[in-house]
Amino acid sequence: MTELKWWQKAVFYQIYPRSFADGNGDGIGDFIGMAAKLDHLVDLGVDAIWISPHFPSPQFDVGYDISDYVSVAPEYGSLEDFKKFLDGSHERGMKVILDLVLNHTSHLHQWFIDSRSDRNHPKRDWYVWRDGKNGGPPNNWMSPFGGSAWEYDAATDQYYYHFFLKEQPDLNWRNPEVRQAMWDAVRFWLDLGVDGYRLDAIGTIFEDPSLADHTSKLSQDDLRRKLKHGFPYEGDQELLDAWDAMYKLQVEQPGVHELMQDLRRVLDEYDERILVGENDDVSYYGNGSNELQMAFNFPLMKTSRLTPNWIRANQQERLSLLPPGAWPCNTLNNHDASRVYSRYSDGVHTDAIARTSAALMLTMWGTPFLYNGEEIGMSDYRLTDISLFRDPPAVWFYKHELEEGTPVEQAVELAADYSRDRCRTPMQWDDSPNAGFSPAGVTTWLPLNPNYKQGVDVASQQSDPGSMLNHYKRLLRLRRQTPALVDGAYIAVNENAEDYLAFLRRSADGKQTCLVMLNLSAQVQQADFDLKGYTQARCLFSTHRPENGALHLNGLQLAPFEVLVTELIS
Ligand code: NOJ
C-alpha cells in the first residue's frame, strides 16, 4: 500500500458525550464513562474518535454553545478526566479529534458578556452588532433554528446577529483579535496532544456585508413545517430553492478560505494534526494541502432512500469536485440527522438495508465516520411528550406553532418531525435497566429507546455471530486487511443496474482490485460483468455466502440485500 497518512487509513467513530456512558450516575454521559468504554471501540476496530463539544456550556444547543473554550464541562468531568480519556485512547492506538465551534459562542461566554455591556467596550466588535431599521431588526434574515437572526439588546439599544439560537451570538471573524483568541484556544488542546478538530458550521462564519434582505417567497414557517429532519431532501426542488433563497446571503461568503488557511497554519505548527469540515462545499479543501484535510460528503446522506443511482451520481459529482490531492470523507449519520437504521428503512427489510449502508460506508473510497450506536443498529426514538424534548430548535418550533394557533397534538408532531433528540438517546450497552448507560433508577437526560430490551444492545450482540455489531466488526476487519479498500480508486461498473450497485477499488500499487457489489433491492439480481481479463473473483466478504470461495463474474446471482466484496483473480 502506498504510504497514506493516519487519517486516510482511519475509520472514525463519533462520540456524543452526553449520551455515551454515564460514569458518575447523574444521568449524563461523562469522561469517566467514556474512558471505561474505550475497549468497545478497540474491539469494534475503529482507529480514531471525534467527540462532540465537551466544553463548559449552558447547553442551550447541547454543547454547541460554548462558554469557555479551554476547559471541560463540569458535568463531563475535570481536565484530569479528559486527559485520562485522551491517554487511554492513545495507549490503545486511537487518535482523538475535538469539535471546534468557530461561528458563535454561548451568550454566556465572557467575551459576549463584555461585548454586550457597552458600545465602547473593547470587545464590542468581537460580535456582529447593528442598529435596527424602521423600529425593527436590521434586515429580514432568519435563523434556521427559529425566528429572526437578530436579537434586540436593550442595554445598548442595538441588535446582535445569530445564525443559530439567540443564545449563540455570531463572532465577528473580520476582527483579527477574535482569530488570535480562538487560535490560542486551538493551541491549548493541541498542546495537550489532541489530534485535530472537526469544524462546526464553517459555511456560516461570514455574512454578506450589504445586509440586503433575502428574497425567499416561502415564509420561514411554511418552509420549516415542510421539512423533515431539519433540512430539505433530494427531489424537493421547491424546498431546496426556498432554503437557498432564504439563507444564501448568510452562508458561503468570501473569506472562509483565507480563514481556513490561517487555521491550517496553526495546526501545522504540530505534527500530523487534522481538520475535518462540516460543510457541503467540497472546495474547502483548498488545494488539498493548505486548508482542511477533509470535508464530509453530506450530499450523500441527504436522501430518504439510498439507491444505486443516487450513490453513483453522488460519487461522480463529488469525486470530480475534489481538488487534486484531496481525500474524500463519508458519513451517513451524526447527532443532527435521523439515524441510518430508521432513515433508509422501507418498513420491512430495515435490518438488511442498514447492513448494506454499513457496507457502503466501509468499502467506498474515503475516510468513514460512524456515529455511536449505529454499530448495534440503534434507531430513531420519536418522543411524543414535549416535556421530554431537549433539542432547543424543536422546542422553539413547538412553542411558536402554539402561538400561531396550531393544535397541541399537531404542534408536537411537527416538532417531533424536526427534533434531533431522536438520534441522541443514550447508548445501549446491555439489557439491564437504563441499558447500562446509567445505573438503574437514575433519570437519564433523554429517555432510552426501549428497544434495548429487544436485543439492540452491545452485550447481547457480542455473543451473536449474526448480529449487527458483528457485521460491523467483520466489515472493519475486512477494510483493515484489504489495501484496495483503503487506498484504491473508485471505478463505477455496470452503471445501468437500477437495483444493485457495483464498483471496483483498485489499489494504488495496482496489485489488488476489489469488486464490491451491494444488492439494494429485495429481489435476487443477476449480475454479469465484462471486466477485461477477469472472469473470476474470490469472495472476501458476503452476508450470504462463505468467504474465500471462487465466483464466476458472469451469471452471478446476488441474494436480496446481499453485500458481496470480492477480489478479482486474473
Ligand atoms: C452544527 C452542529 O452539528 C449542530 O449540532 C449545531 O446545532 C450547529 N452546528 C450549531 O453549532
Image (cartoon, grey):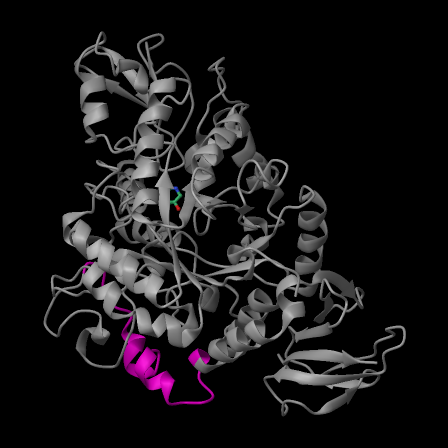
Indicate yes or no whether the magenta region holds residue 487: no
**Depth check, front residue: 257 or 385:** 257
Whether 415 is drawn above or below 358: the answer is: above
Q: Is residue 130 visible?
A: yes
- Magenta residues span 445-469
Whether 534 is drawn above or below 343: the answer is: below
Residue 258: x %, y % from top left: 53, 26
- Location of the C terminus by quadrant is bottom right
Which quadrant of the figure has residue 461? Answer: bottom left
Whether 358 is drawn above or below 274: the answer is: below
Which quadrant of the figure has residue 563? Answer: bottom right
In the displayed structure image, the side of residue 272 where residue 529 appears, left or right: right
Residue at image coords 60%, 57%? 4
Residue 131: x %, y % from top left: 32, 9
Q: Is residue 346 visible?
A: no
- Location of the N terminus by quadrant is bottom right
Residue at image coords 44%, 72%? 45
